[in-house]
Image: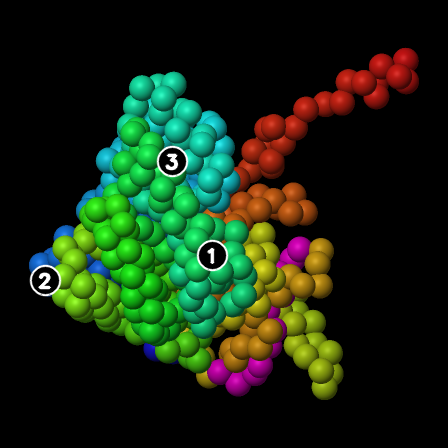
Amino acid sequence: MSLPYNEQGHLLIGGIDAVSLTETYGTPLFVYDVERIRKNARAFVKTFEERGMKAQVAYASKAFSSVAMLQVAKQENLSLDVVSQGELYTALKADFPVEKIHLHGNNKSVDELEMAVEQGIGCIVVDNFYEIDLLTAILEDKQKEMDVLLRVTPGIEAHTHDYILTGQEDSKFGFDLSSGQADAAFERIHATERIHLIGLHCHIGSQIFETSGFLMATKKLFASMEEWRVKYGFIADVLNLGGGFGIRYTKDDDPLELDAYAHALINEVNEQAAVRNYPIPEIWIEPGRAIVGDAAVTLYSIGSIKEIPGVRKYISVDGGMTDNLRPALYHAKYEAVVANQMDAPVHEKVSVAGKCCESGDMLIWDVELPEVSHHDILAVMSTGAYGYSMSNNYNRFPRAAVVFVENGEHQLVIERESYEDLLRLDCSYKKGEESLT
């Protein structure tokens, strides 16, 4: 891993000394290189533009949602994928264009659907029959109309972790193609005047390093689109092929260049349209991790050091599964460096433990580092996706702060939680006091 550092041997993030950032903002600390976010977003957007394809690149905000992040997404002319009322509320606070917001979710509530309808968002991705009924009633009550995509499961199992497979038949998401569920859903929507079906959606998984799964899914969706054209005269204006494009976490990962995914999808859509004499639909994709994943580093202070002779050496940091749940949830792997010893020789293998009261709170099981001391700064790489988003207050630890760096400047974009924040929603139990008097 070749990373930039200055003459003091300190890691540089977006040209800023990582150690100085910890001195200013404390640890644990998420640091996002905004230039990297922009580069990743443009890799997708420019590919579609250069190929002359109508497209929307929708940032999957579940990867990392904040007002500042969505402002950057807006600046980069991205659309937005939200999966909850909270993510939609954040988008509205960021003044994100409502017509470019798409609402997902396998169990959308009445409140979420009503908010989406009232705000006039661009599209709802319909996931189940219950949702069709809810949306129909809400639109009728409010005398509104809504564009929707039909989410289908094409029966494609991407090469990824079982927990992040979403395109196979046995999934909580979407309508199954092979059983006829998707056909039944199409017929119900097609008969509803206030719901306008504009196309199909699928998502086959996450952290995918090849294009074959996406191409197979494209073929299957085109087959269904062709059937519906013949049977109902329906022509899809939009084909949303989801996200899941992989990034590099460790040296063992070998992802494609981001534009390679876009080129492959464009080629397959053009081929399928030509073979079937089908009008080329607008292509939508939903990268989240691919835009922010490798743009962030989490900085920790090293505390206790424990060596078990002949077994293992543990170093503990002041964060863990409260700011990065992925190792415990997915057995996700990361690489790390000592941010204040970038020019020191690497000569020992250690395991990085979090400070939660859980044996499973291990960030990295084996990583080679220089000899470390208490208060050294550990930098864990590629933590921009699903780190802060999944962060929690287990053991009553406050959530970390988030800083953006760009053009040699740094700015706090999410404050560190205080202990007062932790207790802000707590209420005293009055009943118990009454029983003791």
On the image, the x and y values in percent for residue 269 come to 21, 63
On the image, the x and y values in percent for residue 276 come to 18, 63
* Amino acid type, label 2: Glu
Q: Which mark is residue 88?
A: 3
Between the C-alphas of marks 2 and 1, the distance is: 39 Å
| Residue with the most extreme front position | 231
Q: Total marks drawn?
A: 3
* Amino acid type, label 1: Ser
Mark 2 lies on residue: 50
Q: Is residue 325 left or right of residue 434?
A: left
User: What residue span does the magenta drawing correspond to?
Assistant: 346-356
On the image, the x and y values in percent for residue 77 come to 19, 47
Nearest the viewer among 269 and 307 is 269
Mark 1 lies on residue: 179
Between the C-alphas of marks 3 and 2, the distance is: 31 Å
Q: How is the image coloured?
A: rainbow
Quarter of the image with the N terminus is: bottom left
Q: 10 Å neighbourhood of mark 1: few (<14), some, or many (≥20)?
A: few
Q: Earlier in the sequence, mark 3 or mark 1?
A: 3
